[in-house]
Amino acid sequence: FFNNTATTDIYTEQIVGSVRCVQETVIYVFEGDNLELKKEAVTIVRKATSVQINPPLSEIVEAGLLPYIIRFHKEPSNENIDEKTKLDLLWTITNICSGTSELTQACISLGVIDYFFEFLDLNNSAIFSQALWGLSNICGESYYFRDMLLERGLLVTILQFLETNTELTMEARRVIAWCFNNMCRFKPAVKLNLVKDCLPYVKKFLQTIDDPEVISDSIWAVSYITEISDTAISLVCQHDLVPIITKYINPSIQPLQKNFMIPSLRVLGNIVTGNDIETQIVVDNGCIPLVMNLINEQSTAIRKEVCFFLSNVAAGTQIQIESILTCEDTFFPKLEWILQNDTNEVKHEALWIIGNIFAGGNYNQSMKLVNAGLLWRVFELFNTGLSSQSKLMKGLIACVNDCLLYTSD
């Protein structure tokens, strides 16, 4: 069955078509003593799991092949297997872990976490990256596995690897950035002490690597960290990440890309939920006019992030509110359009801009909204048939309450 490497692709197709048809033969090879045939069997199964469309991952697990793959390198006769076979073994299990939650759980129940950790070789970038890829799949499964891997020291090991290896392939950098991303996401938020040490390395990635995947994953990692706590926001500011993030919404520095803009806006929007000093750092980096320009984007997700950002700046000092109002000639017409025509999610964030300006602004600042007709647009929303329990209605009531409190003063 495995005696001709030229026929490997043929037998790979057979496995893709029906793993069960070759199950007994593959297992027979794994249980035998011929190392070369075993290595070819590993390659065939790896190729089957790497098929782009509908790879037979469940069939491979159900056929009982996974335990043979996992324990392959521990068999006495296989101790000195070559790097290619190690990569094939790791690649196969990584592919299976990237499938459904059930498949990931099946791998975990067979001890793949210990398996991947065993292959985190600081002196072999290719092996380390492949093992880390598998652990990243598990880390991205849920907050439970995220915390488990962090508490086991996965981040510490990655940072040791980065310190040991200064010349990394782009693929290795992508895997590490993606792992940083997965380590920081999910609710409930990760404990800051478990992930804070990645910030200098994320910053270095953003400063030195011009790769879309690395950049996107790195910015998302920062955005998730800014959601942890006020302390986390302060830490991001202390690492001077604001000017670095700002360049991804500045078309004069580089062309705007949606996959950078959304996480960048999220970072900046989260930072301005912090104290007035941190908000001022964002203002001083010239973010207000840059963000204002993005309110014309066709993407609903971007307009929502823009309004979220501006609503939080509007909750700051009167000087910070004025930094928004200096753009009134272009901003007010767009805000009016949003209140009349945009989705309810974007309208909800826009209402908070108006309510916060009334709540914290001075007389002249509030009158600018009134003279622009924005208060009238707010009241018009009561006639749009909103459910009394809808998120937009609750935001509308909060906005009107701020306005009435201001007028009563």
Image (cartoon, grey):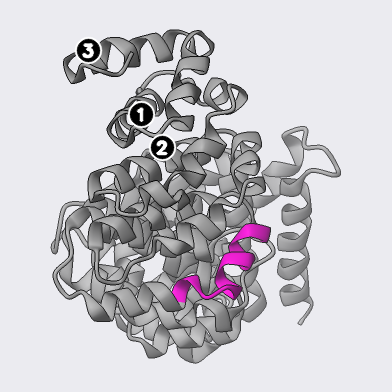
Q: Position of residue 290 (x, y in %)?
A: 29, 64
The residue drawn where x is 30% and y is 56% is 127
**Which one is closest to the eye, mark 1 or mark 2?**
2
Amino acid on which the number 3 mark rests in the picture: Thr
Q: Position of residue 376 (x, y in %)?
A: 63, 51
Location of mark 2 (residue): 92
Ranked by sequence position, the earlier of labels 1 and 3 is 3
Q: Identify the element where label 3 is drawn.
A: helix
The residue drawn where x is 32% and y is 36% is 35
Residue 146 in magenta stretch: yes
Amino acid on which the number 2 mark rests in the picture: Thr
Say the numbered circle drawn on residue 172.
Answer: none
- Please indicate, yes or no, whether residue 300 appears anywhere in the rendered image: no
Q: Position of residue 374 (x, y in %)?
A: 56, 55
- Please indicate, yes or no, whether residue 106 appears anywhere in the rendered image: yes
Rounded to the nearest whole Å, what is the CA distance between mark 1 and mark 3? Answer: 18 Å
Location of mark 1 (residue): 50
Q: State if disc 3 and disc 1 touch (CB < 8 Å).
A: no
Q: Which residues are magenta?
A: 144-155
Q: What is the chief secondary structure element of the magenta stretch?
A: helix
Ranked by sequence position, the earlier of labels 3 and 2 is 3
